[in-house]
Image: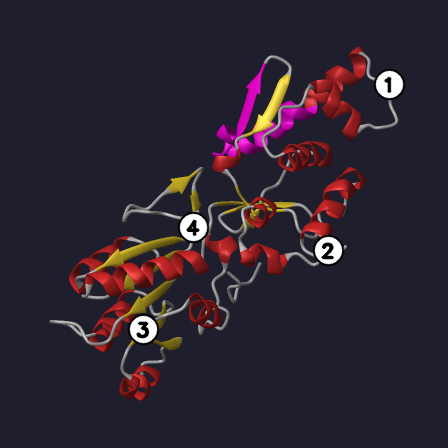
Amino acid sequence: MAYAVNAFESNDNNTKRKGGCIRIKILAIDDEEFALESLTEVIREACPSDEVFSFKEPSKLLAFAKENDCHIAFLDVEMWGMNGLELALELKKINPQINIIFATAYVQYKNDAMDLRASGYVMKPVTKEAVEREIENLRHPIDVKASIRFYVQTFGNFEVFINGAPLKFISEKSKELFAFLIDRRGAAVTTAEIASVLWEDKTYDRQLKNKTQTEMSKMMKALRDNGVGDVIIKSWNQTSVDCEKISCDYYNLLRGDVNALNAFYGEYMASYSWAELTTAALMQKTGMG
């Protein structure tokens, strides 16, 4: 989904966190069971990499919103008890930056919705195309990096963010080492393979092995000091990353996230020559090659 942003799917109403990563949270409410199921399914089709939380009762939605940082809310208008317009006012008290999108069968509420500074207004039956259109034009852009504790950026130059701030590696080689592991997407590599990437013009001997292991230690220290050391999987002479614990634009693109697809402009880990093969593959996958 192509969000208005500065930079996987949940089937229940529990916030899922992996390695401290926080996905975009989308709320959906309708007091009719079939309409709610239909709305939720369409949102998940349009936003496959995000979490969708469904509610039939406004009170339960508000309770959830008080405990979680939610980004978008699709609200039915005509509901028993509290209607969607009243619910929108309460949501904005909790989070003024939440994007309210009304989903209704009634056109007459559109002016009221706009008076509430709603982000969008879609007519039932809601379609995937309508959801995509509204989310591409959110009133309050979602800063994905700021919303995720641990985020890896590979498009353009390689960077790692902790709570929105760049992680400072002890050395450039230790940073490049982590970039290489990210590029391998969970495939285990040996010390010799790492050395051949970091020092491609040098012969692998004991001295180079020790040098490589030193950079591995520096990488691990930087990650551990920032509370994310568990993203590295180590066994005898093999090192890899746990992809399930990493939020990464490259991984999201491969999973079919249109938001990540729109963020790719033909550059991938631009500082590293060994990344050219992946760049070419991404160019072909996205139709740029």
In depth, the one of 258 and 138 nearer the eye is 258
| Residue 70 in view, yes or no | no
Residue 102 as seen in the image, left or right of residue 86: right
Nearer-N-terminus badge (3/1): 3
Residue 189 location in percent, x, y? 67, 23
Rounded to the nearest angstrom, the CA distance separating label 2 from label 4 is 25 Å
In the rendered structure, are the residues bearing label 4 and label 1 in contact, judged by CB atoms less than 8 Å apart? no
**Which quarter of the rendered picture does the C terminus lie within?**
bottom right
Residue 233 picture location, percent across and down: 54, 24
Nearest to N terminus: mark 4 or mark 1: 4
| Residue type at tag 2 | Gly
Q: Are marks 3 and 1 in contact (CB under 8 Å)?
A: no
Image side of residue 229 versus residue 212, left or right: left
Q: What secondary structure is found at the residue carrying circle 4?
A: loop
| Picture disc at residue 203 | 1
Kindly identify which numbered label has been placed on residue 220: none
Name the residue type under label 1: Thr
Classify mark 1: helix, strand or loop.
loop
Spatial CA span between label 1 and label 2: 33 Å
Give the residue drawn at x 29%, y 70%.
Answer: 92
Callout 3: few (<14), some (14-19), or many (20+) C-alpha neighbours within 10 Å? many
Q: Which mark is residue 103?
A: 3
Report the disc number at residue 23. Answer: 4
* Disc 2: which residue: 266
The prevailing secondary structure element of the residues shown in magenta is helix
Looking at marks 4 and 3 on the same chain, the residue that comes earlier in the sequence is marked by: 4
Can you say whether 287 is above or below 225 in the image? below
| Amino acid of disc 3 | Ala
